[in-house]
Image (cartoon, helix red, strand yellow):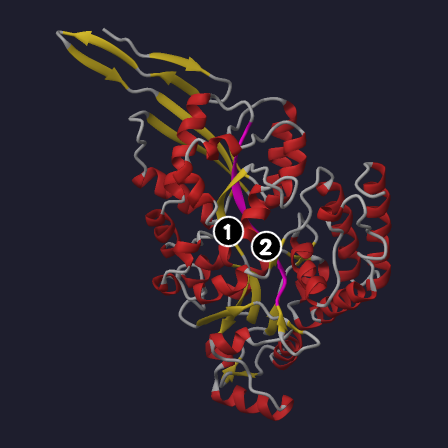
Amino acid sequence: MTATTKIKGVMAAAGFAASLMVGGATISYADEVTLTMAVPDWPPTRIMKKFFDEQYKPKSGNTVKLDVDFIPWPDFYTRVNASLTSGEQKYNFIVSDSQWLGAFVEGGYFRKINDLLDADPEFKKTFMEIHPNPLNAYATYPHKSENYYGFPQFPDVLVNFARKDIICHEEEQKNFQAKYNKKLPCTGEELDAMTWDDFRNVGEFFRRKKGEMLAGKPAEDDFYGIAFQAGKAYDFSSMQINGFIWQMGGNIWDETQAPSGQAEGVVNSPEAVKALETYLSLIEYMPPVAKTGTMDIFKEDELFREGKVAMAVNWIGLGEASLDPKTSKVSDKLVFGMMPGTKGPDGKMVRWSNIGGQPFVLTTWTTDAQIKEAVEFVKWWLSSDIQHQFAAAGGQSAVKSVYSDPKYVTYRPWNRAWAPSLDWQKDVWHVPQFFELLTQQQDQFDLAITGKQDAKTTLDNIAKFQQNLLTEVGLIQ
């Protein structure tokens, strides 16, 4: 005799638990709840799925399935946007990029979560322990308001990946000192102290042709000193250039200042132009692919793992492959530090950077049964034990009690740079027009990266476009 009742939703199955009295005993039947999730395809989400499959046991007693659609990063926004706007209601759980919040909240797709937090004070306490920079980036719309829409899934920052077998080599150290009258950075602490001028010197110094001597032996291929994001696809160049602009005293259009904050005169300020010029000046010291506008984070990561670059500024989220001897020729030769900074007028280092990482979000058509199971999963995910395990597997945590634990820095070699970097994170826009802003900006940056346009013309064009668009929609007056 079966008394289990199932309700089929558009996206997933959810049901009620049913009970029968048989011979005076109560028999409960667990239900099946499926959470259908769209995620970018990279290590942090693969780890999450592995943890769910191997460890997660729902407190409800229901059978909970996590049906994950892994989508390549370059196609991630367009695929999710097409699904949401088509009305198919395929996904009820999404690992969203932070800048999507405005567009998909205003579109009626992302569910506000304040009521879920208020209903669970203990969970809300954990939520509010998240560092304010990732919390604002991943959860709030309007930006930095108390309207919450996302639970952090994977927080991320840019760090400096480096080849210690190259930069610590005695002969290279001696020759660098002779040429620049400055020590070649070798340790993590020395990487932390690097400015972009130091980064340029490393780039210039380590340009070697195949067969030229490199760290005591002939280079097996052409070798390059440095690499960072310089890709037209999605947001790759913007994520790097924004950091240069903030560090050097400029700004992007600031949505928190709407409607009085302007684009023209800010986006193309002299400080911003100088910052973009600095960024562009470093490209000549990178592998030639950078000049084609196709140096996305994956190509950069590939070149570094192939042993063709001495230093690369990239996301922690890609770091795991560099440590794996199956995927990296340099797995046993690495040291990590904070991304280079800029010395301010007071001589102190300025380290502003565009935050990476993503939140979990719930869609507005998610059923009550799915919401309950999704929240329980997120509570489990943000629990201290799982956050420590995630960090130990190559992820990161923005929960202060986790990342401030002394053992946190022992999990991965880049973790020493994690907590100090968090205070320096800002984010790009969250407004509904973000994709129009981003696409035009990426196109313009590509013209500069490929040598077709100078920095001032590039930022003048971006500023004019942003001023016109944001004025039309009432975000600038």
Q: Is residue 148 visible?
A: yes
Q: Nearer the viewer, residue 26 or 200?
A: 26
Q: Left or right: where does residue 226 sit relative to residue 383?
A: right
Q: Left or right: where does residue 323 sit relative to residue 199?
A: left
**Which residue is identified by label 1?**
155
Secondary structure of residue under mark 1: strand
For residue 354, the mark is: none
Disc 1 + disc 2, Cβ < 8 Å = yes
> What is the magenta range?
351-363
Question: Does the magenta portion include 251?
Answer: no
Percent across and percent down for residue 9 are 48, 17
- Determine which quarter of the picture holds residue 379: top left
Please name the amino acid that badge 2 sits on. Answer: Ile
Secondary structure of residue under mark 2: loop
Q: Nearer the viewer, residue 399 or 291?
A: 399
Q: Is residue 302 visible?
A: no
Q: Left or right: where does residue 455 sit relative to residue 67?
A: right
Q: Residue at x 56, y 36 (%)?
A: 149
